[in-house]
Amino acid sequence: MEAASVRESAKNPFVSDREIYEELVRHEGLRKLRPLFDPLLGHAVWWIAPRAVIQSRYFNNVIESSYEIWHDPRLRKVDWMKHLPPALKGKHVKYTTPYELHRIGARWDIHVPLLAHERVIGYAGLVGLKSGVSHEVLNALTGYIRLLLDNCFKAEEINRLSAAIRPRAIALSTVHTVHRIINSTLNLDELLTRLAHLTTQVMRANRCAIYLAEKPLKPASPSRKQRGPKTGCLICKSLVGYPKKKERDFRIAFGGGVEGQVAQTAQIVRRKKFICVPLIDEDVIGVVKVSDKRDKKEFAYFDQEILTTLAEEAVIAIKNAELYEEQKKVTLSTIQALAVILGTQVPSAASADVFLKLALEIAHEMKLSDEDVQALHYATLLKETARVGIPPEILHKPAKLTGEEYRLLREHPIKGAKIVQSFQSLRPVVPIILYSREKYDGTGYPKGLKGEKIPVGARILSVINAFEAILMGRPYRGRLSLREALDEIQRNSGTQFDPKVVDAFVHVVEREGFKRLLKSIGMEG
């Protein structure tokens, strides 16, 4: 029997004889074989079976599988010992013809070997053929079976290739998705939450937990294992799909539980109901555990491949976020040190913290982006930087300033911006400091900007500066009460101040929690 394309499956380790045979018996074309050829072959008994079944003489299986395909009750009356293909009674026979005819009494049997991998994987046949059937009809029959086998091999090959490619396609898609997440946020907590949700979606699981090592843990060598687990722990940073009573930030000791063992050994653990994978940079930095598949099936090797790929990309995202957080801390420390060195902090550190908190709360009330909030944070700490260049007698003068003194004072934001812009990481802060003395109606300085042409951070800082001056007092004016300060700010809404900023400011200041903060620094009433 010629079947070149089927024999090529011998070179393909993915497709087995059994799989090709099972694909064949499921094929709709096999069911159509009998009604198509019966009129030409005299209504013989049709049968099919894999080689292993016939060799073992499990004839009931031959009967049942053939009946399921062709529904012929005569199958149960055949003497299968008599009609067994002769090739199965001796050694392996290499078939050189597409079929064999065997005379039994007045009738004929036809045996069609099903060839794949240059081996017989089974037989199809007919029992009780009448004489006189032409070779053309028999060749057409075997050609049809050959075509079915060829199609079955290709279908099974596609199925296997699809199964092999699917986890890689998912992994590739996961890489792109993680890259989008990396670019969408550098906040570590937010990043881990998004990664946990993504993991449950990709893995089609209900639960995901992400743990980070309290400090990076080097993978254990055999000698380390013999000495026992290292001290330290994993901290749970993100949970998806767990009961609400299970809180974040609980700890698991290195070597304790599945998660601790994975962290200590840097080895993947896969069980029927979960997979636990280490997050490895140069050291183990954490663990991700996925459990409870939505389809209730067991986790397979390709699930492990997908999660491993996701974990590799997650490490990059986590390290980027950690680096960003570290840079923020360094920048903030630099700003705080700069403010102290230049002597620009207001007299009370406690009051400085309150006004900083007020600025940030207004920004959140107005739903500013993380980048804008951070720039405002830095600008509030450095808002009086240029005072170092203004003579103290002008800053503390109780009387009205002269024209020249007022001109020097108006240079205050320009000088402050010049000091700040020398720091690359503080470039977003420059416009806030430079334009913090602008007025909403365009009568401010240094540029006379108007309305929303003034950066939003500068509009917020303008309100903060005024509120601080009213509450804390200045050499030329005494302190006012909180109520008086609120009234003053609201009176100047739309002229000196942005009405949207004033609305957010009032909402924040009138909160009970914020009133208590103001009271703690002696600002009440």
Image: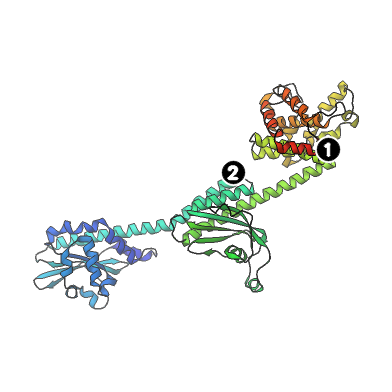
Residue lying at 21% horizontally and 63% vertically, measured from the top left: 67
Mark 2 or mark 1, which has the lower sequence index?
2
Residue 490 visible (yes or no): yes
Residue lying at 84% horizontally and 24% vertically, measured from the top left: 407
| Front residue of 74 and 445 | 74
For disc 1, the marked residue is 344
For disc 1, the neighbor class at 10 Å (few under 14, some 14 to 19, many from 20) is some
For disc 2, the marked residue is 184
Amino acid type at circle 1 is Thr
Residue 273 x %, y %: 49, 61
Q: Is residue 60 left or right of residue 105?
A: right
In contact (CB < 8 Å): disc 2 and disc 1:
no
Figure quadrant of residue 441:
top right
Spot the residue most to the bottom.
90
Q: Is residue 91 above or below residue 346?
A: below
Real-space Cα distance between discs 2 and 1? 35 Å
Quarter of the image with the C terminus is top right
| Front residue of 409 and 258 | 258
Quarter of the image with the N terminus is bottom left
Residue lying at 60% horizontally and 55% vertically, measured from the top left: 315
* Rendered image: mark on residue 354: none
Figure quadrant of residue 439:
top right
Residue 18 x %, y %: 33, 66
Residue 421 visible (yes or no): no
